[in-house]
Image: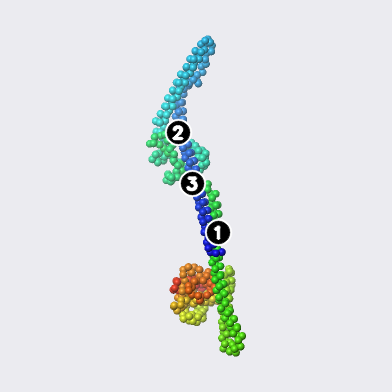
Amino acid sequence: MKKSTIWILTIVMALTFVGLLYMQFVYMEEMINMREQHFDEGVKRSLYSLSTTLERNETRNYLEEELLMVEPGIAGNSLLNDNSTPDFSSQPGSIYNRDKDKYKKFQETLQKQYLYQKSLLNEVVLTILSQSSSRPIIERVDTTLMKAYLNSELANNGITLGWDFAIVDRHGKVVAKSAGYDENGDINEMFTQTLFPNDSEARRYYINVFFPERNKYIFKSISFMIPSFCFTFVLLVVFLFTIVIAFRQKKLSEMKNDFINNMTHEFKTPISTISLAAQMLNDPGVRKSGTMLEHISTVINDETKRLRFQVEKVLQMSMFDRQKATLKLQEVNANQLIHNIVNTFKLKVEKYGGKIDSQLDAEIAEVKVDEMHFTNVIFNLLDNAVKYRREDTPLELMVTTRNLPSNRIEIAIADNGLGMKKDDLKKIFEKFYRVSTGNRHDVKGFGLGLAYVHKMVTELKGDIRVESELGKGSKFIITLPIINE
């Protein structure tokens, strides 16, 4: 799959997920607003009903008191309480007159009763206006009945949450409250209603109602959306993981292609040289010359060693797929081993006009390693320094050792070569990764050397890091545990 195709798929899927998440958030926000609106309207309706009921109850109480005070008068003047019956024993000729008188008397009684009831109501209204608002609010409102009625109204509106209340005057002073009411609570989360709206403004009282679990109640109503968000999040993580894997596989494929190309080149040269030497051996004139035979034999031997070395490098690939490498550990003196490696490598460095020095200051240098692999690690690092040398400056190599406080030995290999960019420092220990050499075309390899070095150092329970600056050289630092007897 082309990289451009992967990017197109990534962008399309990213836009899809962004759109899906946006729609879910918008829907959730609308649900929350709707639930808040429904809740607030239900509370306001209940509080308004409470206020109306309190006024009606107070009016009824005053009316009952007035009626009780004048009940005898009502009975005397009420036609309904009149037990008299018409006298039908009189002469028939006077029945019409008696009925007419009775009707007039009935009209007069109704008129008197109407006027009395009107005056009674006016008196009650005047009493309410003049006396009720001057009474203490605690006498006007029974908090127990008020709570019961408000609970019933809230339940009718689908609200069954616990609530706290406070009755306050127009200055905000609390005159009565429930046990759980917080006077320092957020005023924006409270619901306020005038208790007796017809009172004068100076004598008005208000009820503040607070629902401690209002937010929980609202969010609980949209809890069904949580699994949807979880599934979307899982899909997003899987999508990101898939994209990362796709890019890694693409990069690995490119590295493997480079590896095959490099391997072909590295194998092609020694095979061609050996083939040419074999053809020369078929020449009778060459066979008669001992010097030529010796030269051809040396060439074949050198190219065979080179070919074998390249094959061994390829075989090192199998080590990266194993969880644990098979090592033959033994105690060796790191200083002595490094000293021998430096002496062996000196000829190669001097061949390119450079020099190599060592400063082995570690007093305790006994380590437990696989001697062959440890030697290969040092050789690989030195060989890389030669490969990535600068053309305008003679190569300088320095190998040092020193003891660290944590019973470890530090082995450092520094050079004044090409150096590396910061981006390369993060990837040089990856399999098949090769640092770009710019316009130089003589640096060949498989991109396995430093990956092999990192693998071996890790297997030996050590650490490796690199310090480098482009154009100024690199320094590889290895730390290994020492055997401190």
- Say few, some or many: other residues with alpha carbon within 10 Å of mark 2 (under 14 / 14 to 19 / 20 or more): some
Secondary element at tag 1: helix
Using the rendered image of the protein, determine whether residue 193 is visible from the camera's viewpoint: yes
Q: State the count of labels.
A: 3
Secondary element at tag 2: helix
Using the rendered image of the protein, determine whether residue 456 is visible from the camera's viewpoint: no
Query: Between disc 2 and disc 3, whose residue precedes?
Result: 3
Residue highlighted by disc 3:
33
Residue 209: numbered disc: none
Secondary element at tag 3: helix
Residue at screen point 52% across, 75% down: 444
Q: Using the numbered discs, state the Cα–Cα distance from disc 1 to disc 3 in whole angstroms.
A: 32 Å
**Relative to 184, is 453 on the left or the right?**
right
Q: Position of residue 347 (x, y in %)?
A: 50, 82
- Say few, some or many: other residues with alpha carbon within 10 Å of mark 3 (under 14 / 14 to 19 / 20 or more): few
Q: Using the numbered discs, state the Cα–Cα distance from disc 2 to disc 1 in whole angstroms.
A: 64 Å
- Amino acid, disc 1: Val
Residue highlighted by disc 2:
55
Q: Are marks 2 and 1 in contact (CB under 8 Å)?
A: no
Residue highlighted by disc 1:
238
Residue at screen point 46% across, 18% down: 108
